[in-house]
Amino acid sequence: MSDNEPSAAEQPPETGEQALGRHLTASATWIRFLFMCLSVALLWVAGIVGCLVVVLGFLWVLVTGDVNAELRRVGQSLARYVEQIIRYLTYNSEERPFPLGGEWPAASD
């Protein structure tokens, strides 16, 4: 550090306006906003797919009398995916959901 620059301890505290301006111009914040908008769209699509899984699962039970194990796995995996999206949207996770950065969650047995 040069002799002309004040140290961090000597700098005046940041005002509210300065902090707001810094936050409004932070590119990381706007990039996250873009990924959040995309995540909301993915959440909407996941809801539609979830409804299809529910209807197909019900029809399967209605016709066969048994639960379709594959549909259960798809439903569980989809539920984990929705959880990942919501965790990202609520700032409880920094990991972006599939296909924005993360992997598709596996269904647990």
Image (tube, rainbow, N blue to C red):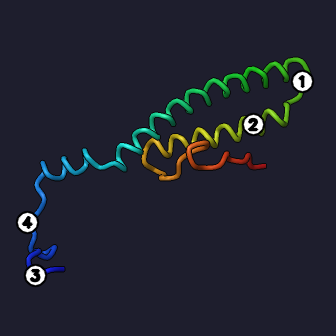
- In the image, is residue 9 above or below residue 91? below
The first of marks 3 and 2 along the sequence is 3
The residue wearing badge 1 is 65
Percent across and percent down for residue 14 are 13, 59
The first of marks 4 and 3 along the sequence is 3
The residue wearing badge 2 is 74
Q: Quadrant of residue 97?
A: top right
The first of marks 3 and 1 along the sequence is 3
Percent across and percent down for residue 65 are 89, 24
CA distance for labels 4 and 3: 17 Å
Numbered disc 1: secondary structure = loop
- The amino acid type of the residue labelled 4 equals Pro
CA distance for labels 3 and 1: 81 Å
From the image, state whether disc 2 or disc 4 is nearer to you.
4
The residue wearing badge 3 is 3
* Neighbours of disc 1 within 10 Å: few (<14), some (14-19), many (20+): few
From the image, state whether disc 3 or disc 1 is nearer to you.
3
The residue wearing badge 4 is 12
Numbered disc 4: secondary structure = loop
The first of marks 1 and 2 along the sequence is 1
